[in-house]
Amino acid sequence: MDDATRTELEAAAFRRLVEHLDEHKEVQNIDLMNLAGFCRNCLSKWYKAAAEDKGIELDYEEARERIYGMPYAEWKEKYQK
């Protein structure tokens, strides 16, 4: 498999993971962290770090919005228990 195809597949898997988490808002970040060792905030930080690695400016709140699908404060108010 060439690098471009591998990158496309990895990106598709990442998008599906984010979609899956969006479909299951009942799963709390603390539960994810306890069971899997990562949460939506971790994904946001990794997304931001990946942007920085490419020389792209992206602040943490913008990265969070991309992962949560809305501003974090709004998500927290609606879904965090």
Image: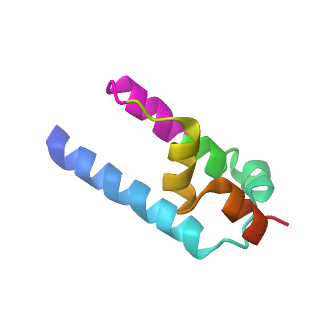
Looking at the image, which is closer to me, 68 or 19? Answer: 68
Asked if residue 12 lies in the magenta stretch, the reply is: no
Where residue 36 appears, x then y in whole percent?
Answer: 69, 50
Q: Residue at x 66, y 50 (%)?
A: 39
In the picture, measured across the screen, residue 12 lies left or right of residue 64, that is: left
Q: Where is the N terminus found, in terms of image quarters?
A: top left
Where residue 21 appears, x then y in whole percent?
Answer: 58, 66
Exactly how many numbered labels are in the figure?
0
Q: Residue at x 41, y 33 (%)?
A: 50
Q: Residue at x 52, y 35 (%)?
A: 59
Q: Residue at x 57, y 75 (%)?
A: 23
Magenta-highlighted residues: 45-56
Up/down of 12 relative to 63, above or below: below
User: What secondary structure is the stretch in magenta mostly built from?
Assistant: helix
Quadrant in the rendering for residue 9: bottom left
Where residue 6 appears, x then y in whole percent?
Answer: 24, 46
Looking at the image, which is closer to me, 21 or 74? Answer: 74
The answer to whether residue 18 shows anywhere in this view is yes
Up/down of 21 relative to 67, above or below: below
The answer to whether residue 1 shows anywhere in this view is no
Q: Where is the C terminus found, in terms of image quarters?
A: bottom right
Quadrant in the rendering for residue 44: top right
In the picture, measured across the screen, residue 44 lies left or right of residue 10, that is: right
Where residue 25 appears, x then y in whole percent?
Answer: 67, 71
Looking at the image, which is closer to me, 5 or 59? Answer: 59
